[in-house]
Image (spheres, grey):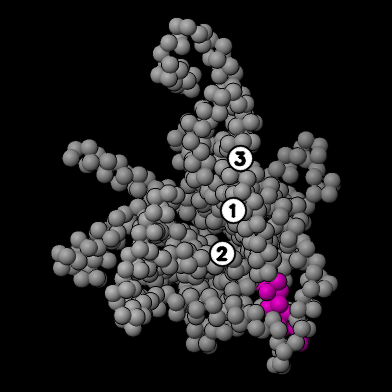
């Protein structure tokens, strides 16, 4: 319906005489038919896709709630924290997520700002370097890492954090790059410097606040990556949450499925919360602009 | 484009002016100082990315006792390992092209609908699902399409047991279905910005000139989208090629995939003298991706010529 209204409006504005001289009804009815067919196939596509993605979730939920006698209970969810090794795995995963985020941002934020500000001609080269981790399969990378890493590094989980920062690099750089393109970096830096700001405080108090959206999405991507990574952790013999789920499945499939579902839902909620936080900020900024 | 070129040319002009005024030695020093800011990043990527990859490539050509050899490469390109490569490439092709096309259709359906909430849910959902590989995903599908899964049960109730008709979740096609679960959302994420770049005005102009829907896609939408679509499929191909966790959790190595074979070398399932075959397999995987990228750039060039 809206589409038809718009189409009519379009005809009205493009040629005001068209309405009086030429009948528009045929065009209108052709549009109605077309809008209907579009809505029809779109509905089918969306329903089928929705089913493909939702049915496995529903199946997993049912499976984790089912008891052997055919009844339902939430005990599979309730017993998760008390399972052997789960708390340790969760702690390790969170620890890795925090350390990796710090390493990635600490390395990538100053470097991306520097490239944008001082070496704009190197930007394409830098683009190319940051995409390399996508080309190297993690399983190949970990083989090489375990080959060359010195023993003192191999014996800590920090080695994983260092490698996760490499895996996250393509996504983190792309978020930061989008953020940096959106602001007038040169002017901001010059303004801050001419007011006597040092490089450190310029970076921390001028650039970082302006990059908030990019930093937020970079953080989310890094955290999601670390919490879900299985290949490197399992081959480096560290029991993070995904590795724990895998190992524990031999004992109790119901609990493992419950944890899998929980992991999915929690990630989704965090992403939704962050995106709505972002929306609110954009709306507030727009409001401020309107008031001014 | 025009404006960009002009800006580049003014920069170039300014540079030539600079180079005439500043003596060459001070210029090299300035370049040196400028490059110094890249040192932390350079050192980091060399240590944690460059060095390991070089080590894999070098070790692929060495025997465990030291000394250079082609033995590893020869083992890696024969028998079960050759079979693994064929299977991996077939799986990657299937799960990049089919979910790629499906992702394009879904993204288009979502974008052309007017529901704002729908768009938001789909964009966050595809972010989550695209990351959602590995072990949890395997469990979801065991509960759905496993031999006693929910959907299998529904089909049995309808009198059709897929397991009697050659279907098995733990085989090639089963793994392909499971991969779709993260490949399709990945394509939606990649292709949505490109679809948003198709201006409604083009469509209106095309239909104003009497173009049918398919003509619009053939002459306007298709050519504009093609490069992004190709890039998306390449990314999907790479992600399917290097996927390890899902297949490992689902099949525990019952179908030969190169990534899993590489992993098994680290797990200690090694015949004496073949310790470095895993690295040769790794080199093979990187080569496959490199060939795919060459294909991609050739097609990309063709496409840009087509656009002109």
Between A266 and B63, which is closer to the camera in this rendering? B63
Between A199 and A190, which is closer to the camera in this rendering? A190
From mark 3 to mark 2, how far is it between C-alphas?
27 Å
Label 2 sits on a secondary structure element that is: helix
Q: Mark 1 points at which residue?
A: B231
Where residue B83 appears, as percent x and y from the top left, is 80, 66
The span picked out in magenta is B272-284
- Point out the frontmost of discs 1 and 3: 3
* Residue at point 53%, 10% (across, down): A25
Q: Residue A157, relative to residue B107: is it above or below?
A: below
Same chain, labels 2 and 1:
no
Label 3 sits on a secondary structure element that is: helix
Same chain, labels 1 and 3:
yes
Q: Could one spot residue B246 in this view of the protein?
A: no
Magenta span includes A261: no
Of mark 1 and mark 3, the one earlier in the sequence is: 3
Q: Residue A288, relative to residue A129: is it above or below?
A: above
């Amino acid at each position: 319906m809206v589409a038809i209204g718009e189409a009519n409006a379009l005809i009205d504005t493009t040629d005001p005489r068209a309405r009086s001289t030429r009948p528009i009804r045929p065009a209108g009815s052709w549009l109605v038919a077309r809008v209907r067919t579009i809505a029809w196939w779109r509905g089918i596509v969306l329903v089928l896709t929705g089913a493909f993605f939702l049915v496995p979730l529903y199946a997993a939920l049912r499976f984790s709630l089912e008891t052997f006698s055919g009844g339902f209970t939430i005990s599979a969810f309730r017993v998760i924290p008390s399972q052997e090794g789960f708390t340790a795995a969760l702690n390790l995963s969170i620890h890795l997520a925090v350390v990796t985020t710090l390493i990635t941002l600490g390395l990538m934020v100053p470097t991306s700002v520097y490239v944008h500000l001082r070496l704009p001609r190197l930007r394409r080269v830098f683009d190319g370097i940051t995409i390399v981790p996508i080309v190297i399969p993690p399983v190949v990378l970990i083989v090489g890492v375990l080959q060359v890493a010195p023993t003192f590094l191999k014996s800590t989980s920090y080695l994983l954090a260092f490698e996760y920062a490499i895996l996250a690099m393509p996504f983190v750089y792309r978020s930061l790059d989008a953020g940096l393109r959106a602001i007038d970096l040169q002017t901001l830096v010059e303004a801050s410097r001419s007011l006597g700001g040092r490089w450190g405080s310029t970076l921390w108090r001028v650039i970082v606040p302006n990059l908030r959206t990019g930093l937020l999405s970079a953080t989310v991507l890094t955290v999601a990556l670390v919490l879900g990574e299985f290949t490197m952790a399992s081959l480096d013999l560290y029991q993070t949450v995904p590795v724990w789920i895998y190992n524990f499945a031999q004992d109790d499939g119901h609990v493992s499925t419950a944890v899998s579902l929980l992991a999915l839902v929690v990630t989704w909620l965090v992403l939704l919360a962050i995106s709505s936080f972002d929306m609110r900020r954009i709306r507030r900024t727009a409001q401020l602009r309107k008031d001014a | 484009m025009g404006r960009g070129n002009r800006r580049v040319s003014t920069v170039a002009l300014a540079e030539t002016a600079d180079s005439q005024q500043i003596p060459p030695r001070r210029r090299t020093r300035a370049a040196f100082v400028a490059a110094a800011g890249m040192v932390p990043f350079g050192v980091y990527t060399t240590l944690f990315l460059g060095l390991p990859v070089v080590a894999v490539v070098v070790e692929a050509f060495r025997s465990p006792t030291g000394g250079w050899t082609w033995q590893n490469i020869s083992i890696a390109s024969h028998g079960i390992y050759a079979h693994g490569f064929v299977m991996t490439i077939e799986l990657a092709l299937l799960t990049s092209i089919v979910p790629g096309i499906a992702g394009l259709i879904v993204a288009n359906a979502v974008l052309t609908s007017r529901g704002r909430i729908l768009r938001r849910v789909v964009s966050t959902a595809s972010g989550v699902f695209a990351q959602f590989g590995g072990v949890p995903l395997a469990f979801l599908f065991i509960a759905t399409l496993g031999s006693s899964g929910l959907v299998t049960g529904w089909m049995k109730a309808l009198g059709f047991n897929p397991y009697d008709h050659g279907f098995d979740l733990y085989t090639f096609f089963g793994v392909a279905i499971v991969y779709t679960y993260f490949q399709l959302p990945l394509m939606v994420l990649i292709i949505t910005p490109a679809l948003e770049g198709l201006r409604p005005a083009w469509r209106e102009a095309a239909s104003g000139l009497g173009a049918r829907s398919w003509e619009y896609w053939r002459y306007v939408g298709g050519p504009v989208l093609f490069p992004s679509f190709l890039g998306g499929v390449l990314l999907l191909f790479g992600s399917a090629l290097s996927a390890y966790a899902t297949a490992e959790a689902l099949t525990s190595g019952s179908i030969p995939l190169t990534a899993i074979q590489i992993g098994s070398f680290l797990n200690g399932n090694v015949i004496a003298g073949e310790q470095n075959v895993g690295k040769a397999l790794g080199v093979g995987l990187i080569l496959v991706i490199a060939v795919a990228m060459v294909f991609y750039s050739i097609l990309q060039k063709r496409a840009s010529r087509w656009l002109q």
